[in-house]
Image (cartoon, helix red, strand yellow):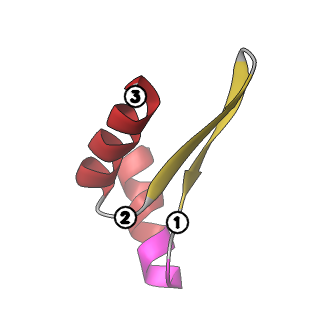
Amino acid sequence: TYLESLAKDLQNSLGTKVAIKRKGKRGKIIIEFYSDEDLGRLVDRLR
């Protein structure tokens, strides 16, 4: 599906598991991290 494709693209870009959950017109993007360093790396990428 379109959302699965977007999640896979984000996973490749960020180097970690990403899930996109949709409810109606709203939703959530869930980005997993596994350590404080991993979180810092993700925050730097998203800035």
* Residue 37 drawn in magenta: yes
The mark found on residue 1 in the picture is 3
The image shows residue 5 at horizontal and vertical percentages of 33, 34
Type of amino acid at the residue the image marks with label 2: Thr
Task: Decide which of tag 1 and tag 3 comes sooner along the chain.
Answer: 3
Circle 1 residue: 32
Mark 1 and mark 2 residues within 8 Å of each other at the beta carbon: yes
Question: Residue visible at 40% across and 56% down?
Answer: 44
From the viewer's perspective, is the residue at label 2 or at label 3 nearer? 3
The mark found on residue 16 in the picture is 2
Question: Residue visible at 39% across and 24% down?
Answer: 2
Question: Residue visible at 75% across and 18% down?
Answer: 24
* Residue 45 drawn in magenta: no
The mark found on residue 13 in the picture is none
Type of amino acid at the residue the image marks with label 1: Glu
Answer above or below: position of 8 versus 6: below
Tell me if mark 2 has few (under 14), some (14-19) or many (20+) residues whose alpha carbon lies within 10 angstroms of its own: some
Tell me if mark 3 has few (under 14), some (14-19) or many (20+) residues whose alpha carbon lies within 10 angstroms of its own: few
Tell me if mark 1 has few (under 14), some (14-19) or many (20+) residues whose alpha carbon lies within 10 angstroms of its own: some
Which secondary structure type mostly characterizes the magenta part of the structure?
Answer: helix
Of the pair 28 and 38, the residue shown nearer to us: 28
Q: Quadrant of residue 9?
A: top left
Q: Secondary structure at mark 3?
A: loop
From the viewer's perspective, is the residue at label 1 or at label 3 nearer? 3
Q: Which residues are magenta?
A: 34-39
Type of amino acid at the residue the image marks with label 3: Thr
The image shows residue 8 at horizontal and vertical percentages of 32, 45
The image shows residue 23 at horizontal and vertical percentages of 75, 27
The image shows residue 20 at horizontal and vertical percentages of 55, 40
